[in-house]
Image: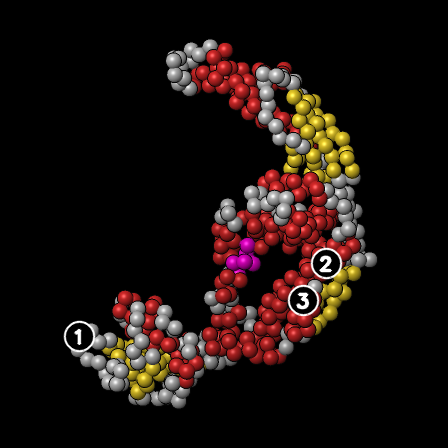
């Protein structure tokens, strides 16, 4: 089997594969004999079928399969041996049925889309903007308020507050506003509601200024837009009973539970940031400031990635691509694509393809490599953010490491993490390799900048 290549332009080439009968006939005979040994063929005992009969029954299909397999292997080996950077896969110039009665030798041709040669420049002469979001005192105050509320105490209150829980008896009313009694009436002795989560502001407002002993007429359906799960939980009955329940109810308040913010003391500091990490208010506020800065840095990194992509595509995005071959390849592998819609689809994917080629060139230049330790560190970061969502901000390193290993053990999730890690290391290397034009901006200005990239 002979494979040759001829370049048709800078980014396209045609492979020609010449196949002679001697290239495949031995393999065909071997496959046919295997069929004879392993298959029960009507009229013959297993393992006693003459090769001529096997040829007559299965020869065409087996020969076709063997040739297609061997040609594909030869093409891929040629690409690998010659270190060709092929986009997609080789596309057959012509797809035709093989007529083994007329021919024994065959010629196959494939068009290949070759990646353009790039030489991306990465040094300190390249300037890319990097925007840091200013952490304001207002941001620190807001986070402090959230922490003190989260770690605060729930205590009995005299009057309803916006974030209070209300306990008491809940009784179903008829259309005249009278309590329904008897079998089938819904009456909850120890009910509890959280007006802060009501979906109706009008229903929330009914509890404003309420005190212990007050009676409030409200509508459970309106508090949750008729959600059966929420209604059944509030009224302590089966979902089926509240499926079409629009009655008003009377709530007789027996207790109001309000939240009192935690005091700024060592116990509170330890709860938020870990034991002895913070010892006074100044250190506490500084720790909050650093925490917010760390969270906002993710936004800065995201915008830097957008800026870097835009910078390099503007500089190198005029590269020539083998569009015609790539379009044929896309149609070949996607049932929903055809000659009428391929131009639109290709137009959408071309910028991403160009960026992928630029990324690969940059990664090669900067010798970006992904180690297992890099994946562990990234998975630990994901784990830490997941714990933080539940207010757990001081998880020890051993717990984070074990959690990270569990994340990486997921075979479906691991490839995505590898890709994320690759992008992280790539842009980290770009940051170190170019000159960053750093600027600290307000959150509003940052949003404005992000919207224009």
Q: Residue at x 74, y 67 (%)?
A: 438
> How many other residues sit within 10 Å of disc 1, few (<14), some (14-19) or many (≥20)?
few
Q: Residue at x 22, y 76 (%)?
A: 185
Query: Which of these two is toward me, 26 or 161?
Result: 26
Please provide the residue range marked out in magenta: 379-384
Q: Residue at x 43, y 19 (%)?
A: 38
Q: How many marks?
A: 3
The residue most toward the left is 182
Q: CA distance from mark 1 to mark 2?
A: 71 Å
Q: Which residue is mark 3?
A: 450
- Counting from the top left corner in percent of width and height, residue 383 is at 52, 58
Classify residue 97 as left or right of residue 362. left
> How many other residues sit within 10 Å of disc 3, few (<14), some (14-19) or many (≥20)?
some
Q: Which mark is residue 183?
A: 1
Q: Is residue 332 depicted above or below 159 in this figure?
A: above
The residue most toward the front is 340
Corner quadrant of residue 132: bottom right
- Say which quadrant the C terminus sits in: bottom right
Q: Which mark is residue 248?
A: none
Q: Which mark is residue 310?
A: 2
Q: Residue 381 lies in magenta, yes or no?
A: yes
- Please tell me whether mark 1 sits on a helix, a strand or a loop: loop
- Counting from the top left corner in percent of width and height, residue 190 is at 27, 77
Contact? badges 1 and 3 (CB < 8 Å): no
Query: Which of these two is toward me, 380 or 229?
Result: 229
Q: Specify which label sits upstream in the sequence, 1 or 3.
A: 1
Q: Determine if residue 273 is in view.
A: yes
Q: Is residue 211 depicted above or below 272 in this figure?
A: below
Classify residue 120 as left or right of residue 395. right
């Amino acid at each position: 089997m002979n494979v040759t290549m001829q370049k048709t332009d800078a980014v396209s080439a045609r492979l020609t594969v010449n196949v002679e009968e001697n290239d495949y006939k031995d393999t065909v005979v071997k496959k046919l004999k295997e069929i004879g040994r392993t298959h029960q063929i009507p009229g013959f005992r297993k393992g006693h079928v003459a090769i001529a009969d096997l040829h007559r029954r299965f020869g065409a299909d087996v020969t076709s399969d063997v040739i297609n397999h061997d040609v594909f292997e030869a093409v891929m080996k040629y690409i690998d041996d010659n270190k060709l950077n092929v986009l997609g896969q080789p596309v057959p110039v012509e797809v035709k049925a093989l007529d083994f009665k007329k021919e024994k030798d065959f010629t196959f041709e494939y068009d290949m889309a070759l990646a353009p040669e790039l030489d991306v420049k990465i040094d300190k002469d390249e300037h890319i903007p990097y925007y840091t979001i200013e952490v304001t005192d207002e941001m620190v105050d807001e986070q402090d308020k959230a922490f003190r509320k989260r770690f605060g105490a729930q205590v009995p209150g005299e009057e309803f507050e916006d974030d209070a829980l209300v306990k008491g008896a809940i009784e179903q009313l008829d259309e005249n506003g009278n309590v329904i009694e008897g079998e089938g009436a819904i009456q909850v002795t120890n009910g509890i509601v959280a007006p802060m989560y009501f979906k109706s502001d009008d229903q929330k407002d009914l509890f404003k200024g309420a005190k212990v002993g007050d009676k409030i007429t409200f509508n459970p359906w309106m508090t949750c837009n008729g959600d059966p799960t929420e209604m059944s939980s509030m009224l302590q009955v089966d979902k089926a009973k509240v499926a079409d329940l629009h009655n008003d109810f009377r709530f007789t308040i027996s207790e109001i539970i309000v939240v009192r913010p935690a005091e700024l003391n060592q116990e509170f500091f330890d709860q938020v940031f870990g034991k002895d990490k913070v010892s006074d208010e100044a250190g506490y506020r500084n720790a909050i400031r650093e925490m917010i800065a760390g969270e906002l840095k993710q936004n800065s990194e995201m915008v830097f990635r957008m800026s870097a992509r835009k910078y390099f595509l503007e500089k190198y995005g005029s590269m020539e691509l083998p569009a015609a071959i790539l379009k044929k390849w896309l149609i070949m592998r996607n049932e929903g694509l055809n000659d009428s819609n391929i131009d639109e689809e290709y137009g959408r994917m071309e910028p991403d393809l160009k960026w992928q080629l630029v990324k690969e060139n940059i990664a090669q230049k900067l010798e970006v490599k992904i180690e297992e330790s890099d994946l562990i560190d990234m998975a630990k970061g994901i784990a830490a953010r997941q714990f933080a969502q539940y207010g757990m901000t001081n998880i020890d390193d051993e717990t984070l490491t074990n959690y990270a290993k569990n994340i990486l053990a997921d075979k479906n999730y691991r490839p995505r993490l590898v890709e994320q890690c690759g992008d992280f290391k790539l842009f980290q290397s770009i940051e170190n390799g170019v000159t960053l034009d750093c600027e600290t901006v307000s959150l509003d200005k940052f949003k404005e900048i992000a919207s224009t990239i």
